[in-house]
Amino acid sequence: MTVPSTPSQHAHSISVRVYYEDTDTAGIVYYASYLRFVERGRTEFLRILGHSQHVLMQEGIAFAVRSVNAEYLKPAKLDDLLAVETAVESLGRAQLVFAQRVMRGEELLLDAKIRVACIDPVSSRPKPMPRNIHEQFKAITEKTV
């Protein structure tokens, strides 16, 4: 059994409403929809650090998912208001692991670890993160230890 992650006070959170397009015919969120929700969480996390993914790509920087480890614990349903929490769990020069959770109130619905690599968007080859971004993630990671 997996022990749920506990993002610290340094986690970022966004609200996501469950729409019809996110669900199956029974009104339960389709498992792949959670991946879109956590993607939005990571994108907004970067944005609050001052980085637009669009601008980063123009500068030759992109972040690509390398692996996903997700535990689906309880179903979300049509019209639910969810919180997507995002925190940095670990950091390397060219990759990082995000701890992400999807909550409905106090209920943990999804617990995920997402490994993301920094790449060149043209060649798709790994590259070190820009120093300023790495330093921001490093400061956040050190606060959560």
Image (cartoon, rainbow, N blue to C red):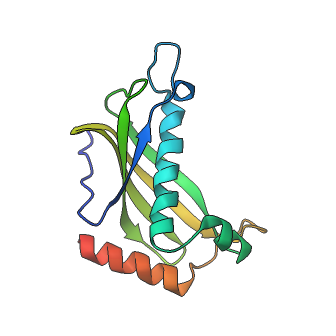
Residue occupying the far right of the picture: 122
Which residue corresponds to the image point at 70% horizontal and 78% vertical from the top-left? 59
Could you tell me residue 124's position as x and y percent?
72, 65
18 vs 16: above or below: above
Identity of the residue drawn at 42% across and 72% down: 91
Which corner quadrant of the image does residue 102 belong to? top left
* Residue in view at x 53 percent, y 24 percent: 20
Percent of width and height locating residue 131: 52, 86
Which residue occupies the foreground of this view, 133 or 105?
105
Q: Tell me residue 19's x, y (percent).
A: 50, 29
Residue 54 position in % (x across, y down): 67, 66
In the rendered view, would you say 10 is above or below 81? below
Q: Is residue 136 left or right of residue 120?
A: left
Q: Is residue 143 left or right of residue 137?
A: left
Q: Is residue 123 above or below residue 113?
A: below
Quadrant (top left, top right, bottom left, bottom right) of the C terminus: bottom left
Q: Residue furthest top?
A: 26
| Left or right relative to 122: residue 41 | left
Residue 79 shown left or right of residue 50 in the figure: left
